[in-house]
Amino acid sequence: MRMSKGRVSELLLDATGERGARVACPKGAVPEPGRYLLAWSPDDKDASLAAPIFPTEIADHEFMAGSPIPQSWEPGTELSLRGPLGRGFNVPADSRHLFLAALGGTVSRLLTLIKQSLERNVAVALFTDSPLPNIPTALEVHPLIELADSLSWADFIGIDLPIDLLDSLTTILGMQPGTTTNCTTQVLVSTSMPCGGVGECGVCSVTGKRQSKLACKDGPVFDLQDLTW
């Protein structure tokens, strides 16, 4: 299991007021879109658990960790890092029309996927009612009310949603029970992941079609067809 050291090099507030941290770290510790790190400050004696952090912007030896981050972190804070952990987004190479939806109050965990896709000249449409940070001008943004009428446009669907909305996803997508999407669909399930797959504590259990899955190691990004929804 990969362990490494990092350091908070900068704290920033984005356009929505969310607090993020720029983390300097070894190249191999930078998480890909949808994957995460467990991070903690060895000097913070009051922190009982490591914090799962997701990237909003990535580079070779650093990344921007999106909100929420521990309030005790300051520029210069030394960090212990475990990961990258879990399974991230896997967009087919021939995808040209990405349909992304943020249902959990923030678009932050989708930002790296958006930026990478636009750099490949892939058309990206984001559906959300959440406040928007600074986003690329090439990104199309639509309210969630338009979500169900736009599914046929996509050849890849990526959704960030809280675990308690999974049972409502059929209704959210405007689909009939028992039907499914017509293209590759992956969901980033947002839930508590305190052990990062080490203890298999079951806190992040997600109902799969064949057996229960753990968001911390089987996800947090899942193929929708593998889940009960």
Image: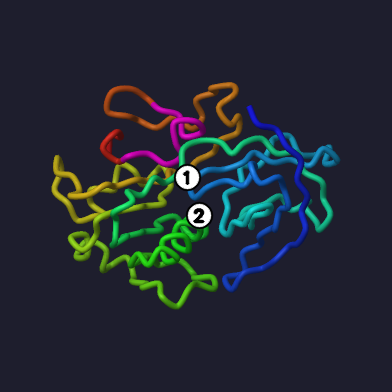
Rendered location of residue 132, percent (x, y): 49, 70
* Residue topped by disc 1: 190
**Label 2 sits on residue:** 109
**Where does residue 26 sit, x and y in percent of width and height?**
70, 45
- Measuring from the top left, give residue 169's x and y in whole percent: 28, 48
Q: Position of residue 172 (x, y in %)?
A: 27, 54
Element marked by disc 2:
helix
Identify the image quadrant of residue 59: bottom right
Q: Left or right: where does residue 188 sit relative to residue 208?
A: right
Number of marks in the rendered image: 2
Location of the C terminus (image quadrant): top left
Taking the image as shown, residue 77 lies to the left or right of residue 1, namely right
In the rendered image, the vertical position of residue 217 relative to residue 222, given as above or below: above
- Identify the element where label 1 is drawn: strand
Crowd rating for badge 1 (residues with CA inside 10 Å; few <14, some 14–19, many 20+): many
Q: What residue lies at 49% left-to-right and 70% top-to-bottom?
A: 131
Displayed quadrant of residue 154: bottom left
Label 1 or label 2, whichever lies nearer to me, is 2
Residue type at the position of mark 1: Ser
Precedes in sequence: disc 1 or disc 2: 2
- Against 4, residue 8 (above or below) is below
Are dots 1 and 2 in contact, CB under 8 Å? yes
Q: Which residues are magenta?
A: 213-223
